[in-house]
Amino acid sequence: MVKAQSGNVWTEKATVMTERDMERVLRRIAVEIVERNKGLDDVVLLGIQRRGVHLAARLREIFKAEEKVKVPAGELDITLYRDDISTLADQPVVHSTSLPGDITGKRVVLVDDVLFTGRTIRAALDAITDLGRPERVQLAVLVDRGHRELPIAADYVGKTIPTSRSENVEVRVKELDGTDGVVICERNGGAEHGVEA
Amino acid sequence: MEWRHKDLISLEGWTREELHFFLEQADYMEELMNRPIKKVPALRGKMVVNCFFENSTRTRVSFELAEKMLSADVVNWSASGSSTSKGETLRDTVWTLEAMGADAVVVRHGAVGVPDYLSKKLHRASVFNAGDGTNGHPTQALLDLHSARKKLGNLDGAKMAMIGDVLHSRVARSDIQAFRKMGVSVTLSGPATLMPEDTGSLGVEYVSDAREAARGADILYFLRIQRERQEDGLIPSIDEYHRRWGATDSLVALASPKAAVMHPGPMNRGVEIASSVADGPNSVILGQVRSGVAVRMALLYLCLGGAR
C-alpha cells in the first residue's frame, strides 16, 4: 500500500534541472504550444494543483512577453477524483478549482509538474468532463519519469528522466518552495513502490 | 493536517486549528455547488444512512445533498413505520444497518446522548450527530461558523449577540461552544424565562435588554421562538416578544454596519425576525443554507475517507 509521503525519509540524490534549465524548458514548451495550435486562439491553460498551477502561470507570462497574448489560465484540483482515496491512510487535502470561464469549445492545455503513473491525468480528464466539453485537451509536463499504469502520454514534455520506483522526482517552484529546480530523491531503505510527486 | 476524527458527536474535542482547516476544506466544497455538474466521485461505494427519529427537513435534505454530491449511496431510514415502532431497540437498529454495510449513520433523535451512545455501539461506521434533544447540533455550528467567516473574514475577537430561546435550543449550545473556540465573545439576550441557569459556566454574558447585546456586535444571531412557549407562559405575548427581542431594523442599526444577521431556520417572520431584516443587506440566512451543504460535504469527505 502506498503510504503518505510524510511517513518516509527522502534524501536528495541529484539535481536534474536548475533554475535556468527550467526557464529554458518552459520557453521551449511555450513555443511548441503556439506551433501545435497555430497560435493561441481559444487556448486555455489549466494547472493541476499544486505545482502545475505555478508552471501554468509561468507559461502565461511567457506568452504575454513573447506573443503579446493574455492566455486565460485556471487551476484544477483533482483530489475528489482520485482512484486511491479509500486506500490512503489519510484523506488527501482538497485545494481550489477555478476556471477562467467556460471551457466548452476551448483548447485546454493541462499543465502538471511530473507525469508518472498517469493516474492524476486520468482524474484530471474526469474532472474536466464534469466542467465542460473542450474541443481538445493537451498535456504539458515538466518531467516525464516513466512507469505509466494507464495509456496516457504527454503532448509537451520538458525532460524525460528515467527513474526507479524507489526514487521520487521533486519539482520545486519559487512560489511554494522558495527555489526553482528539479531534484531526484531516494527513499532510505528503497522500498518497492514510489510515491507520485 | 492529519484528520483524526471519525465521528462528529460534539465539537468539544476539536481544536481551533482543526476548525480552521475544516472551514477551508468546506470553502472548496462550496465551489462544487457552482459547477454545471454538481457531483464528484470521492465517496463512490460508501453507504450513508440518514436515521431521523425526529422531524427535520432542512438538515436531512442538506445531508442528503452533500452525500449525493460526493457520490455516496444514500438510504433514508425514518423512525415512523420502521422497526422501532415494533419494539426494536436503537442498538439493534444500528447494528442491523451496519450489518447491511453502512459506512456512516447520520442520526437525529429527541433524546440527549443518542449519537454518542451509537458511536460507542457501532464497530466500524462513522456517526454524525444531526441534533440530539436540547443537547447539541454540531453541524449547525459548523455551518454558522462557515457563513459568519465568509461575511466577516477573521472571527477572532468578533462580538456575537445571540438573542432568543437559548434554554430549549441545541443550536445555541453548539454555537456558543464553536464561536467561543474561534475567539468570538458571546452575549445572550432574551426573556429570562428562556435562559439556562448556568450562563456563567457557558462562558457567556446575559443581558435582558436586546439593544445592549446588539450594540456594536459583529454577529446578530436570532433563535427560533416556538409559538407554544406563549401557552407555556414563558413569553408574555408574540407582539411584545417581537418588540423587545425580535430582529427589527432599529435593533440591527445598533450593531456594526457590516454585521451578519443569522438565523438557523425555519424562520417565524414577524416573531423573532422582521421580514425587512430577514431579506435585508445584513442577512446571511440563505448563505447559511448553502454553507450547510458545504460543511456536511467536508465532514463526510474527511471522516469517511481512508483505509478502514
Image (cartoon, coloured by chain):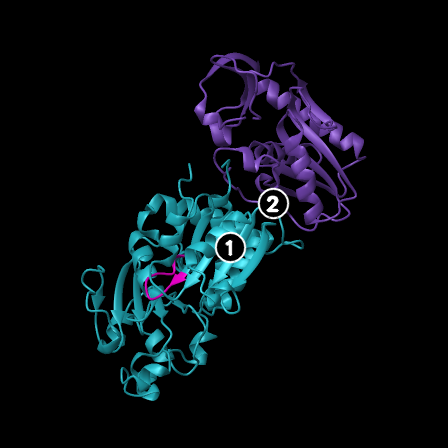
Chain colours: A purple, B cyan
Label 2 and label 1: CA atoms lie apart by 20 Å
Look at the picture and state if A148 lies above or below B3.
above
The magenta stretch spans which residues? B131-139
Q: Residue at x 47, y 51 (%)?
A: B95
Label 2: which residue?
A: B45
Check if mark 2's residue and mark 1's residue have beta carbons within 8 Å.
Answer: no
Decide: few, some or many residues near mark 2? Use Cα within 10 Å; few <14, some 14-19, many ≥20: few
Q: Amino acid at mark 1?
A: Ala
**Residue tagged by mark 1?**
B294
Left or right placement of residue A3 versus residue B231 in this view: right
Q: Position of residue A174 (x, y in %)?
A: 50, 28
Select label 2 or label 1 by which is in front.
Answer: 2
Q: Secondary structure at mark 1?
A: helix
Q: Between residues A25 and B262, which one lies in front from this camera angle? A: B262
Q: Is residue A91 left or right of residue B270?
A: right
Q: Amino acid at mark 2?
A: Gly
